[in-house]
Image (cartoon, rainbow, N blue to C red):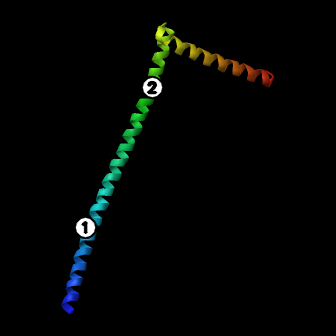
Amino acid sequence: MLQDLENNFSELEKKILLLQKNYKNLTEKFSELNIEHEDLKKRYDEERKKNQVLAEEQKNIKLYSAISGNPEHNRLMKNHINRLVKEIDFCIAQLQNSGL
């Protein structure tokens, strides 16, 4: 009976050591993954900012192309002018309503 208890204790001790080792490995892996996650977030933010800049540049290029008379972008130019006219009309209406 004492031998059985010692065997059980020895088995438990081995399992505890194995669990400690696994826990240590998992915490190390977690730390590595956290670092990788932060790096990926930074890269994502940088790429998103680059994408926004490129989208704005593309929009400006289309607008410049429309201004220069490119027939493919005439509709874009008309829409842009219409938007500007609506903004001006809205501003004029606000000025008239405020009594200026």
The secondary element bearing badge 2 is classed as: helix
Q: Is residue 23 above or below residue 61?
A: below
Q: Nearer the viewer, residue 95 or 61?
A: 61
Tell me the amino acid under the disc marked 2: Ala
| Number of other residues with Cα within 10 Å of mark 2, as a class: few under 14, some 14 to 19, many 20 or more | few
Residue 21 placement, left or right of 96: left
Residue 56, image x, y percentages: 47, 24
The amino acid type of the residue labelled 1 equals Lys
Q: Which of marks 2 and 1 is nearer the N terminus?
A: 1
The residue furthest top is 69
Q: Front-most of 48 and 5?
A: 5
97 horizontally vs 25: left or right = right
Q: Please provide percent x and percent y for residue 25.
A: 27, 62
Report the quarter where the C terminus lies: top right
Q: What residue is drawn where x is 27% and y is 70%?
A: 19
Choose top left, top right, bottom left or bottom right for residue 40: top left
